[in-house]
Amino acid sequence: MPSNDNHVACETCRRSGRLERGGIDRREMLKVVGLSAGTVSALVVLPACGQATGSAPTGPVSVGNVSALSVGKMLVMSNVVVARDTNGVYGMSAVCTHEGCLLDDGAATVAAGLSCSCHGSTFDGNGTVTRGPARTALQHFAVTIAADGSMVVDGGQPVPASTRTPVG
């Protein structure tokens, strides 16, 4: 297999042997790409360890209706997280601060938090790092709730992690 000259060697990739193998192997590739033809372009968004990456939102992102977000619930929608606690609704980046991999909401609850399948970082339900290699908390963004209940996370408006939008 040809080497991956663009590979930035992370410790996890070194330990797993992916660096020596030159990136992802055929089995890993098939897991990502699937068996359907025409999906080779998906490889462009994959980092060297074979996981999807993204960047934090930079503008408004529609995240559904507040009626679908009960207290204690958390949802990842592409590169943004929307969650609700007893104080209201909040939004934050769903991009790991370690190497930019997209986070997973697992049980979809604030109590369960978020995890990164790339290198094992975990974050609590408010975006604070609970296990590295990530060292930086997730950025929070302003959330607006319209009269009809539709919610928007504004990636262009960072806010403190304690900011909540009350549910009226």
Image (cartoon, grey):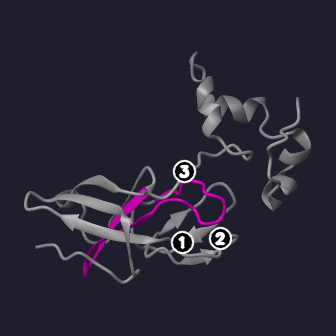
Quadrant where the image shows the N terminus? top right
Check the image and report above or below for 25 versus 120: above
Left or right side of 35 for 126: left
Q: Quadrant of residue 156?
A: bottom left
**How far, Cα to Cα, is label 1 from label 2?**
9 Å
Check the image and report above or below for 83 versus 128: above
Q: Nearer the viewer, mark 1 or mark 2?
A: 2
Q: Are marks 3 and 1 in contact (CB under 8 Å)?
A: no
Front residue of 142/90: it is 142
Q: Which residue is mark 2?
A: 134
Residue at image position (58%, 62%) is 96
Q: Mark 2: few, some, or many residues within 10 Å (few <14, many ≥20)? A: many
Residue at image position (43%, 57%) is 57
Q: Are marks 1 and 2 in contact (CB under 8 Å)?
A: yes
Q: Which mark is residue 123?
A: 1
**Region in magenta:** 80-106
Describe the element under mark 3 as helix, strand or loop: loop
First of labels 1, 2 by sequence position: 1
Check the image and report above or below for 115 versus 13: below
Q: Mark 1: few, some, or many residues within 10 Å (few <14, many ≥20)? A: many
Residue 141: x and y in percent read 37, 69
Q: Which residue is mark 3?
A: 54
Describe the element under mark 1 as helix, strand or loop: strand
Describe the element under mark 2 as helix, strand or loop: loop
Residue at image position (58%, 69%) is 122
